[in-house]
Amino acid sequence: MPTVRGNTATRLIASGGHEQVLFVGDGDVGLRAIIAIHSTALGPSLGGVRFWHYDDDEAALRDALRLSEAMTYKAAMAGLHQGGGKAVVLWDEPDRSRAPELLHALGRAIDGLGGRYLAAEDVGATTTDMDTLAEVTPWVTGVSESLGGSGDPSPVTAFGVLCAMRAALHAQFGKSDVRGRRVMVQGAGHVGAHLARLLAEEGAEVFVADRDPARATRVAADTGATVIDAEHALTTWCDVLAPCALGGVLTEELAPSLRCRVIVGAANNQLADRAADVAIARRGILVVPDFVASAGGIVNIAQEFTGYDRDRAYAETARIEDTTARVLEWARHDGVTPNQAALAMARRRIEEEGRGRRWRSGDPAAWTAGRPLTRLRG
Ligand code: NAD
């Protein structure tokens, strides 16, 4: 039985406007997971599988609900015909690998949703995990290229963050070039490492921090970046702060200590709450909504539906620069924060194109050229 207290679970699900939440438990293989589908108005919900330590079921549920909702807005802003979902697996040591039996049990639960939730990689997950899920369900993306998938999405995600950064630099300084800019990358994981490399190649002065110092040191050795103590990453003096670790890092309390002019990174749900958004905006710091900046990963994955093509994935991802510029212009024009502007834009698209729709297996979707989707990769 879930340990969520009283009626917390159903109340949380109902209040967030989610379509469906599935609790999964399998004692034989040690699996405890929650799959949340926020919206399928624009198409099947897609979102990563996160392996993470949660104190209890309530913390896991809150994370799944929050992350799946963000995926809805991310897909809407990226112009994709898909909705938002997320799976979280309660897993005490995210770096510890999973037994195939556990992944198969999760895969069967995903399969039961009939394509309304498409799995992908997220924090803690690997391409190998996706390949193992794919042994029992077709509804999984980000599988190895040898299996017809798009592989690790993080290089494309990092490229998308760079595109968003250019638009933000242009809005803040009148020049989109990253050359000579001081950029602090928080998190030297999959995306952070690729972003640091891209920035270094383009002549930025890169700083990198990770709570695992060995990772930061490795990225610094590869890119010529300077390692900063993880504790000081967010308050380091720089032009651009790029949060590429976990969400919730931008708080109202942090706002007075920030020493950057632009914040743009891959981490999902960077802003702890609305108060943080407003407090940071008041300081004249431009925060690019993470669900706009980090869309490269799902744009990349969406190419799997019609036959993966890496060049097309990069070309589509480059559009993030224009989208970011439009968001920042809307925000400036309406006197709201970029986050508020992007949310309004995403909700408007969902309302106009997807009002009242709930995707079911076999429904035609635009990215299948009007043909009913019954499985991925042919
Ligand atoms: P990852 O697990 O490979 O890397 C995260 C890194 O952050 C790890 O090295 C970890 O040690 C470090 N970290 C955690 N807490 C930290 C802290 N307080 N200070 C400094 N470092 C810390 O994950 P990733 O795939 O690189 O993703 C990074 C973020 O971007 C996540 O929030 C993820 O949800 C988001 N994201 C990733 C993708 C993708 O394509 N991988 C796409 C969209 C969004």
Image (cartoon, grey):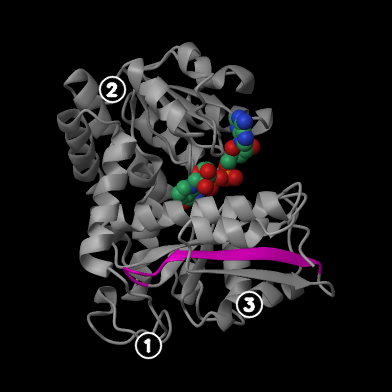
Examine the image and state in which quarter residue 313 appears.
bottom left
Q: Is residue 355 above or below residue 256?
A: below
The CA span between labels 2 and 3 is 47 Å
Which mark identifies residue 190? none
Q: Which residues are magenta?
A: 30-43
Is residue 126 in the magenta section?
no
Sequence-first disc among 1 and 3? 3
Query: Which one is in front, 133 or 128?
Result: 133
Q: Position of residue 90 (x, y in %)?
A: 72, 56
The CA span between labels 1 and 2 is 48 Å
Identify the image quadrant of the N terminus: bottom right
**Residue annotated with mark 1:** 362
| Residue under the point 49% across and 40% down | 267
Q: Position of residue 348 (x, y in %)?
A: 23, 55
Q: Is residue 249 in sight in this rendering?
A: yes
Q: Is residue 318 in sight in this rendering?
A: no
The local crowd at label 1, few if under 14, some if 14 to 19, many if 20 or more residues have their Cα within 10 Å, is few
Query: Which one is in front, 49 or 18?
Result: 18
Badge nearest the viewer, 2 or 3: 3
**Residue annotated with mark 3:** 109
| Residue under the point 58% across and 75% down | 110
Sequence-first disc among 1 and 2? 2
* Amino acid type at image mark 1: Gly
Which mark identifies residue 179? 2
